[in-house]
Amino acid sequence: MRKQPDTLKYGLEDVVPRQELPLYTLQHIVYFAAGIIVLPIAVGLYLGLSQGELAEFLQRTFFLCGVVTLLQLSFGHRYPIIDGPAGLWASMLIVMCLVVSEMGDSLGELRRDLQLGILIAGGLVALLAASGLIVKISKLFTPIVNGVIILLMVLQMSETFIRGALGVTDESPAMDPKQMLVFLVTIVAILVIAVYAKGFLQSIATLLGVAAGWVLAVLMGLSEHRPAMDQIFSIPRVWAFGTPSFDPGVTITCVIGALVLLSMSFASLNSMAEAVGETVTDRRLSKTVLFHGIATILTGIFAVIPFMPFVSSTGVVLMTGVAARKPFRIACVCMIVFGIFSPVAAFLSSMPSTVAYAASTVVFSLILGQGLKEFQKIRLTNRESYIIGISMISGMGVMFLPDQAFSALPETVHFIASNGLVTGTILAMALEQIFRKKEA
């Protein structure tokens, strides 16, 4: 174990003073909500969900997010890392919906296929972890690969952040000055407090910035519509999309997506370990992936977007200086309660998306720095430059292509090839193994 960094105010095992505990817990809840609400709403619309189904979709996501994160915190990696809807999965699901729509097939059938496909993918990941093979697979994720993954993930999300900042949507392609003002006020408030404040105030910069942005959004009439909830208390349903069905193309795509997403588990784990001054052991890695597989199985059963450990959690710890488990554990329990107590989930899901994008932009700027730090671990010769450059250029290039660019390919290949993060990751791993470094 390495020495705990001096930048941490409270380490993993430290006890947070009782008077500070509520605000740190609330700040974690804000990050949970900010990281959760955007993707389910976006994907739910592509999946063809009604307003009522979308509300349930959100509620199931809140509930399972709390359960899975608490499992990892208690029995898996034991770090304050949020598990929530994966951007990679969200983009893959959206591509699948577009392909199915182009082919004239039923979105309802796709939803049922996805439940079983995701469950099978999660079972395979859990099996790899239980068999010990995951330790060998992790050797593929070198600093070059991890750096490419993190940078491409941030770049892939950057369009979403800027569209959110400008209030640009497919229905309204023109910039909305009001939303841009809310975005700027939120992000400036967070940065000013984070950079110039001291002590406790500095550690809750995001919470204060989000509060300021939310109030301004309400005053400007930009508050989000709360989804309708028929009951005050409701237990999330399993197989909410109907009886699961099997489709080979969908299942293969889900398995490939789950395997590629393992890279994010490794990147998140290594990133957080470095932030708190620890080293990831093979045992901790295997336990993390085992529970990640279990989490993926649960997302299939509960019919939500599959989860991944958020690399942004490292940014939260770096910015707040608080890695203590207790406030994070309480936040996990709160998320489970929110998934059962409908009005709370409805309120949190009404956070203005512009405010959520602003908070995420600040955190992801720190994550981009973590990706650059991965490259500092290597000696940058021509070999490394070729691998990084080709992988990054290819991954970013795919992100700019229209959805129809790969429409001539088989359905499964289309799903994979049209995702820049997947393309760049596969290239980085392949090139790293093909052009092995010469032994000194």
Image (cartoon, rainbow, N blue to C red):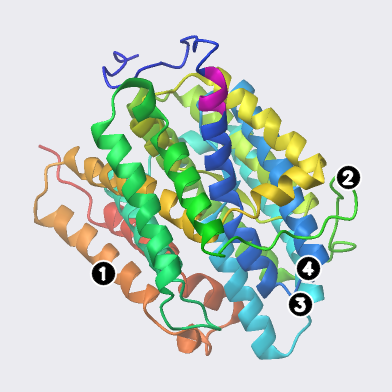
Asked if the magenta segment contains residue 326, the reply would be no
Which of pointers 4 and 2 lies earlier in the amino acid sequence? 4
- Nearer mark to the viewer, of 3 and 4: 4
Q: Which mark is residue 51?
A: 4
- Could you tell me if the residues under marks 4 and 2 are in contact, i.e. CB atoms within 8 Å? no
Q: Along the line of sight, which residue is nearer the eye, 329 or 138?
A: 329
Q: CA distance from mark 3 to mark 1?
A: 33 Å
Residue drawn at the location 69% of the way across and 32% of the way down: 334
Which of pointers 3 and 4 lies earlier in the amino acid sequence? 4
Compared to 342, does 41 lie above or below?
below
Q: Along the line of sight, which residue is nearer the eye, 53 or 262?
A: 53
Q: CA distance from mark 3 to mark 4?
A: 16 Å
Compared to 436, does 223 lie above or below?
below
Asked if the magenta segment contains residue 22, the reply would be yes
- Disc 4 is placed on an element classified as helix
Disc 2 crowd rating (10 Å Cα; few below 14, some 14-19, many 20+) is some
Residue drawn at the location 53% of the way across and 33% of the way down: 28
Q: Amino acid at mark 3?
A: Leu
Q: Which mark is residue 234?
A: 2
Q: Amino acid at mark 2?
A: Ser
Q: Which residue lies under the disc numbered 1?
A: 393
Q: Along the line of sight, which residue is nearer the eye, 396 or 409?
A: 396
Q: CA distance from mark 4 to mark 2?
A: 17 Å
Q: Position of residue 383 (x, y in %)?
A: 14, 55
Which of pointers 1 and 2 lies earlier in the amino acid sequence? 2
The magenta span reads: 21-25
**Left or right relative to 99: residue 434:** left
Q: Which residue lies under the disc numbered 3?
A: 107
Disc 3 crowd rating (10 Å Cα; few below 14, some 14-19, many 20+) is some
- Disc 1 is placed on an element classified as helix
